Image (spheres, helix red, strand yellow):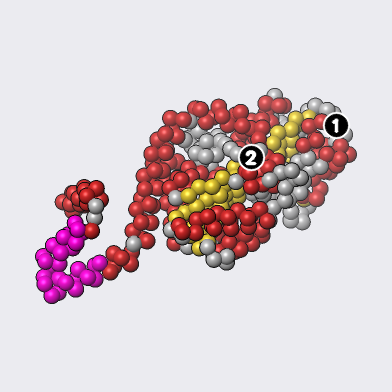
C-alpha cells in the first residue's frame, strides 16, 4: 500500500495547457467521488491552484498501474483540449516516497513558481478539507497531509524562507508599479478579492496605502464603502473602468471577467493602463495588450521575477528541505507501523500468553530467538542497531 500522485504544474505546462486542466469546485468533488467508487482507489485528494493540478491517491501496491490509469483517464474524461493537444503528455506520475516528498515540498512552497510563497499552504489545507467533506480521504492521506502541513509551518517559523515574503500577489503589484512608474494616487480595480490570491493582493495594496482601491462584489449593493476601499457591483465593472489605472483579476470564473470589445467601448480617457490576470483559466482577454499605451501580464509573465527571488532563497531552501525530510520520515515510520498494527498486536498477545505460562523472561527470550532465526543477517544487524537506540531512549526516561 502506498501513496501515488498525478501532477500537472507550471514546471511542465504553460498557462494555456494549465487552463485546460482547471476544474470548478463541483467538478473537483465529482472527480473525487468517482475515484473512490471505482474499486482500486481507496483515498483521493485533489489540489487545484493557478499553477498546478495534482491528484493524491492511496491504494494497494499490487494495483499501482490500475490506480494510475483509472485516475488519469477519469481526469482526462472531464477535460477538453484544443485539437492536436494530448492532455496525457503533460501528466507526471509519482509513487511512494517520491509522491510523499513532493507533497511536503509543495506545502512549504518549495515547488512553487515563487519559492516560499504563502498561499499554497492554505490551498493544501483546503484540498485536505474538501476531501474530508467529500468523504474521499482516509487515515493514510489525511495523516500524510497533516505531517506535510506541520512540516511546512515549521519551515516558516525556523527559516527565513518567508521572512521577506514574495508571492504572486506582491509580484503582480510590482509589475503594475513598474509599468506605470508609480502607483501613488492611482485607481485600482480588483476583481475577485474574496479568493485567496485576490485577498492577498487587497492586503498588499492596503498595506502600502498608495492607491484608491475599488473592489467588485457579486452581492447586490449600491457602492458600499469603507475608509480603505470602495465596493462596486460586479455587473457595473465596465462603467467604472475608464477611471481605472490598474485592473487586477483573480477569480475562479470559467469565463472572461474582462473582454477586449467591452473594454474598448468603456475607455474614453487616454492614459496608461495595466491589466494583470492571475487566474487559470484566464480572466482577462489578452488582446487588451493591443490597445494603445496598455500593459498586460498573466501569471506566466512573472517567471523572471520569481527566478530572481528563488536564487536569493536557495540557502534557506536547503535548510527547509532538511526540516521537511525529518517530518516525512516521521510519517513513513507511522505508515509502516500502522500497516503492521495487527501483526504487532498479535505478537504482543502471544508474548503475554507465553509469559502467563512460562514467565516473562522466557517469553521475551523466545521472541528474540524467533526473531534471530527469521531474519537475514543484514536485517538482524539493522534490528540490533535500532535496539541500541531504543535502549538509549529508555535510559533517558
Quick check: is 346 in the magenta stretch?
no
Q: In the image, what residue occupies the spot 13% across and 75% down?
A: 357
Mark 2 vs mark 1, foreground winner is 2
For label 2, the SS is loop
Q: Is residue 309 left or right of residue 340?
A: right
* Position in image of residue 267 (x %, y %): 85, 36
Quick check: is 370 in the magenta stretch?
yes
Residue closer to the observer: 85 or 187 = 85
Q: In the image, what residue occupies the spot 76% across and 49% down?
A: 255
Residue closer to the observer: 40 or 286 = 40
Residue 29 visible in this rendered orientation of the protein: no
Residue 325 lies in quadrant: top left
Q: Farthest residue in the bottom direction? A: 357
Q: CA distance from mark 2 to mark 1?
A: 38 Å
Which residue in the protein does label 1 denote?
Answer: 269
* Position in image of residue 195 (x %, y %): 64, 49
Region in magenta: 347-373
Q: Earlier in the sequence, mark 2 or mark 1?
A: 2
* Position in image of residue 291 (x %, y %): 83, 31
Q: Which mark is residue 13?
A: 2
* Position in image of residue 280 (x %, y %): 68, 44
For label 1, the SS is loop
Q: In the image, what residue occupies the spot 80% across and 35% down?
A: 288
Q: In the image, what residue occupies the spot 11% across and 66% down?
A: 362
Residue 39 visible in this rendered orientation of the protein: yes
Q: Is residue 135 left or right of residue 183?
A: left
Residue 170 lies in quadrant: top right
Residue closer to the observer: 392 or 241 = 392
Mark 1 Cα shell of 10 Å, populated few (<14), some (14-19), many (≥20): few
Amino acid at each position: 500500500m502506498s501513496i501515488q500522485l498525478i501532477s500537472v504544474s507550471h514546471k511542465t505546462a504553460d498557462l494555456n495547457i494549465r487552463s485546460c486542466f482547471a476544474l470548478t469546485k463541483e467538478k473537483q468533488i465529482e472527480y473525487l467521488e468517482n475515484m473512490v467508487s471505482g474499486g482500486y482507489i481507496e483515498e483521493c485528494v485533489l489540489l487545484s491552484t493557478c499553477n498546478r493540478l495534482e491528484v493524491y491517491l492511496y491504494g494497494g501496491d499490487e494495483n499501482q498501474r490500475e490506480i494510475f490509469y483509472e485516475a488519469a483517464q477519469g481526469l482526462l474524461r472531464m477535460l477538453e483540449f484544443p485539437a492536436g493537444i494530448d492532455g496525457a503528455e503533460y501528466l507526471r506520475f509519482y509513487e511512494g516516497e517520491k509522491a510523499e516528498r513532493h507533497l511536503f515540498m509543495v506545502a512549504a512552497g518549495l515547488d512553487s513558481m515563487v519559492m516560499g510563497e504563502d498561499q499554497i499552504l492554505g490551498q493544501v489545507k483546503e484540498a485536505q478539507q474538501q476531501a474530508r467533506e467529500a468523504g474521499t480521504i482516509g487515515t493514510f492521506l489525511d495523516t500524510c497531509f497533516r505531517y506535510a502541513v506541520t512540516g511546512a509551518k515549521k519551515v516558516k517559523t525556523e527559516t527565513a524562507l518567508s521572512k521577506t515574503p514574495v508571492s504572486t500577489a506582491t509580484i503582480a503589484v510590482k509589475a503594475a508599479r513598474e509599468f506605470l512608474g508609480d502607483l501613488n494616487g492611482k485607481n485600482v480595480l480588483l476583481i475577485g478579492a474574496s479568493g485567496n490570491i485576490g485577498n492577498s493582493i487587497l492586503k498588499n495594496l492596503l498595506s502600502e496605502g498608495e492607491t484608491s482601491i475599488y473592489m467588485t462584489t457579486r452581492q447586490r449593493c449600491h457602492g458600499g464603502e469603507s475608509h480603505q476601499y470602495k465596493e462596486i457591483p460586479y455587473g457595473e465593472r465596465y462603467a467604472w473602468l475608464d477611471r481605472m489605472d490598474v485592473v487586477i483579476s483573480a477569480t475562479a470564473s470559467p469565463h472572461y471577467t474582462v473582454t477586449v470589445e467591452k473594454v474598448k467601448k468603456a475607455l474614453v480617457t487616454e492614459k496608461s493602463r495595466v491589466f494583470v490576470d492571475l487566474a487559470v483559466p484566464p480572466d482577462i482577454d489578452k488582446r487588451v495588450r493591443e490597445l494603445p499605451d496598455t500593459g498586460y501580464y498573466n501569471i506566466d509573465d512573472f517567471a523572471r521575477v520569481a527566478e530572481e527571488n528563488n536564487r536569493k532563497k536557495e540557502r534557506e531552501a536547503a535548510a527547509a528541505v532538511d526540516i521537511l525530510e525529518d517530518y516525512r520520515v516521521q510519517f513513513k515510520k507511522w505508515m509502516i507501523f500502522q500497516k503492521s498494527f495487527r501483526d504487532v498486536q498479535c505478537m504482543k498477545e502471544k508474548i503475554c500468553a507465553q509469559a502467563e505460562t512460562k514467565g516473562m523472561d522466557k517469553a521475551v527470550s523466545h521472541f528474540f530467538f524467533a526473531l534471530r532465526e527469521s531474519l537475514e543477517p543484514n536485517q538482524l544487524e539493522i534490528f540490533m542497531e535500532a535496539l541500541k537506540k531504543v535502549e538509549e531512549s529508555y535510559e533517558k526516561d
